Image (cartoon, rainbow, N blue to C red):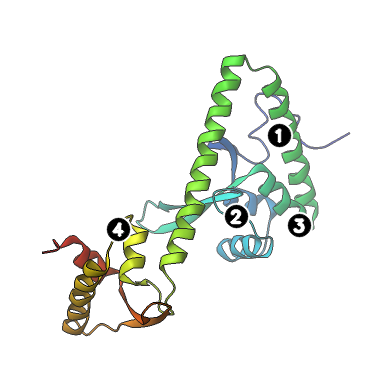
């Protein structure tokens, strides 16, 4: 006989709280950490798990900031059931096995509930999943967009054309020259360094800090 709580209407929350995060069931990583009785500090523990097992943000988990009553800020993590189950499994102790079995029972319960959905409820659920999928695709595309524009060795430095591409602003050669001249002048005035990268057309092109480019792109091109 299993010594885990049976999955009825009142016991889902008894072992490890399960909440709703963006339309999906989620587990607070801090609650899981406490249940597993890990001796490691929470922040070190969760970061190590995410890195070692290659969990993907906005797919396996979501991170968010919380402000405490004393004004302190903490980083929290909402884990998918699959992610929480895997973390519990690799903990390698009795509490980990117990948590893993609990999450399996949760998943089975959710599957049973989905079988009883009306066609309208199924349509709504699928629509929500599609929206979440589109958001994840948009996030990935945006990250790729940033990587294309951001090829400097210094963080947050971009070329004129790269910054324009990142913000969906078309920049021709004449405009790039004007913007580049303004950005160079601002960097010299504020004693900010500039970077350079190879360019197949011009040999090398300059790269400027993000805050400088934000300013020059807001100015009208006369």
Identify residue for label 4: 170
Disc ID at residue 56: 2
Left or right of 158 on screen, residue 188: left
Q: Which of marks 2 and 3 precedes in the sequence?
A: 2
Q: Nearer the viewer, mark 3 or mark 2?
A: 2
**Which residue sits at x=60%, y=60%?**
46
Q: Residue at x 37, y 71 (%)?
A: 156
Q: Which of pointers 2 and 4 indicates the residue nearer the eye? A: 4
**Residue drawn at point x = 24 percent, y = 74 percent:** 180
- Mark found first going from the N terminus, 1 or 3: 3
Please report contact status of discs 1 and 4: CB closer than 8 Å, yes or no. Answer: no
In the rendered image, which quarter is residue 3 located in? top right
Left or right of 179? Residue 87 is right
Q: Earlier in the sequence, mark 2 or mark 1?
A: 2
Mark 1 or 4, closer to the camera: 4
Percent of width and height locating residue 220: 13, 61
Front one among 171 and 95:
171
Q: Judge by depth and name the residue closer to the eye, 179 or 40.
A: 179
**In the image, is 206 to the left or to the right of 83?**
left
Structural crowding at the residue carrying mark 2, measured as other residues with C-alpha within 10 Å and reported as few (<14), some (14–19) or many (≥20)? few
Q: Which residue is mark 1?
A: 106
Could you tell me which quadrant the C terminus lies in? bottom left
């Amino acid at each position: 006989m299993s010594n885990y709580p049976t999955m009825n209407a009142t016991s889902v929350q008894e072992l490890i709280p399960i909440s709703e995060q963006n339309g999906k069931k989620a587990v607070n990583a801090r609650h899981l950490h406490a249940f597993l009785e890990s001796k490691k500090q929470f922040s070190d523990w969760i970061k190590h798990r995410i890195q070692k097992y290659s969990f993907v943000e906005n797919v396996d988990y979501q991170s968010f900031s919380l402000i405490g009553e004393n004004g302190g800020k903490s980083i929290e993590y909402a884990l998918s059931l699959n992610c929480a189950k895997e973390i519990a499994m690799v903990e390698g102790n009795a509490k980990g096995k117990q948590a893993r079995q609990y999450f399996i029972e949760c998943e089975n319960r959710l599957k049973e509930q989905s079988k009883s959905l009306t066609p309208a409820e199924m349509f709504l659920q699928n629509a929500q999943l599609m929206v979440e999928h589109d958001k994840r695709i948009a996030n990935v595309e945006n990250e790729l967009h940033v990587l294309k524009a951001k090829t400097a060795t210094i963080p947050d430095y971009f070329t004129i054309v790269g910054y324009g591409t990142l913000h969906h602003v078309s920049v021709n050669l004449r405009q790039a020259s004007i913007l580049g001249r303004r950005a160079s002048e601002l960097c010299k005035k504020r004693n900010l360094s500039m970077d350079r990268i190879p360019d197949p057309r011009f040999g090398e092109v300059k790269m400027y800090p993000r805050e400088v480019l934000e300013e020059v792109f807001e100015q009208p091109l006369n």
